Image (tube, grey):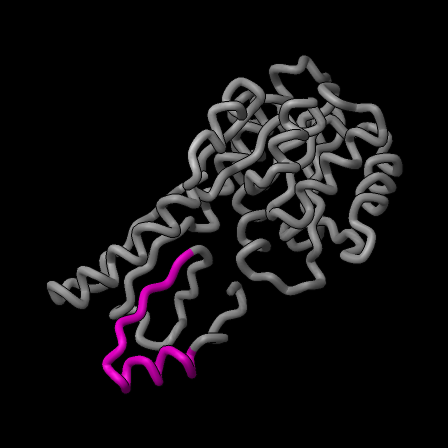
């Protein structure tokens, strides 16, 4: 869970009873006994891969200028997602600046660079309204599996498939289909096989060999139309 400390009581009870603990997916740096617990997952900074891809796509598109937006449900207080947005935003800004093109675009991730808030109860229409209100959107990035399909739906609803650089997070069936249709340019996978397999292997090693706190950074897998059909071929994806 991205809510820091949410599992502290469970972790403390497990340790008191000699039960080994491993964490996966979202990283909580403040969880009880953190230094004694192995973690398998993706750092929020991995979202920079999406930010770099977004900037490259916009530059390659030949766009002379316009808005690059980062819609997110900021009011939910998801710290992990907030950090992802910031990482992607900073990476996009860095790439555009390195190309000498930053001044040509308005890169907007909200006042705190954690995203432009969209209505959590009506995300698609909220993103549609956001894109329409700007009138010059050339790129967008969504930082979780909640907003990403809505971004793809908004792009499709506005008939902008393939005309705007739209990147997101997670590789669920809907994201994969949106990549195929061009509603999404690409999306970042969270390496589900590694995140499912390695924590169990780590717990076995801890029980059988006394090995603990061996962390694995799964980074992120950028999937586009060229590679989407390679995803999901086997059960672990």
Q: Which residue is drawn at 60% across and 21% down?
A: 57
How far across and how far down the image is residue 180, in percent?
Answer: 64, 23
**Residue projecting furthest to the front:** 235
Please identify the quarter of the rendering in which residue 51 is found.
Answer: top right
Instruction: Specify whether residue 227 is in view.
Output: yes
How far across and how far down the image is residue 198, in percent?
Answer: 30, 51
Taking the image as shown, residue 38 lies to the left or right of residue 142, namely left
Q: Is residue 25 located in the magenta-colored stretch of the structure? A: no
Q: Residue at x 38, y 50 (%)?
A: 195
Please identify the quarter of the rendering in which residue 77 is found.
Answer: bottom right
Total number of numbered labels?
0
**Residue projecting furthest to the left:** 209
Q: Residue at x 40, y 42 (%)?
A: 219
Q: Residue at x 75, y 22 (%)?
A: 161
Taking the image as shown, residue 143 lies to the left or right of residue 134, namely left
- Front residue of 201/84: it is 201
Please identify the quarter of the rendering in which residue 136 is found.
Answer: top right
- Front residue of 232/218: it is 232
Q: Tell me where the magenta segment starts and ends, as one range.
A: 8-24
- Front residue of 204/186: it is 204
How far across and how far down the image is residue 25, in percent?
Answer: 44, 55
Instruction: Specify whether residue 106 is in view.
Output: no
Q: Is residue 11 located in the magenta-colored stretch of the structure? A: yes
Taking the image as shown, residue 74 lies to the left or right of residue 136, namely left
């Amino acid at each position: 869970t991205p809510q820091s400390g949410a599992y502290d009581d469970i972790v403390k009870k497990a340790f008191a009873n000699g039960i080994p603990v491993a964490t996966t997916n979202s990283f909580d740096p403040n969880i009880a006994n953190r230094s004694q617990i192995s973690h398998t997952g993706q750092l929020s900074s991995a979202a920079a891969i999406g930010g770099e891809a977004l900037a490259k796509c916009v530059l390659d598109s030949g766009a002379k200028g316009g808005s690059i937006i980062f819609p997110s449900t900021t009011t939910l207080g998801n710290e992990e997602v907030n950090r992802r947005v910031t990482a992607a935003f900073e990476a996009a800004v860095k790439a555009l600046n390195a190309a000498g093109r930053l001044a040509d675009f308005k890169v907007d991730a909200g006042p705190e660079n954690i995203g432009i808030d969209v209505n959590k109860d009506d995300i698609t229409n909220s993103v549609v309204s956001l894109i329409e209100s700007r009138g010059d959107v050339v790129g967008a990035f969504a930082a979780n599996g909640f907003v990403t399909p809505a971004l793809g739906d908004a792009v499709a609803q506005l008939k902008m498939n393939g005309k705007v650089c739209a990147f997101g997070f997670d590789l669920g069936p809907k994201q994969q289909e949106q990549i195929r249709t061009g509603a999404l340019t690409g999306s970042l996978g969270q390496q589900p096989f590694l995140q499912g397999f390695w924590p169990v292997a780590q717990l076995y090693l801890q029980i059988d060999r006394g090995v603990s706190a061996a962390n694995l950074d799964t980074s992120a897998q950028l999937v586009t139309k060229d590679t989407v059909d390679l995803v999901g071929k086997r059960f672990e994806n």
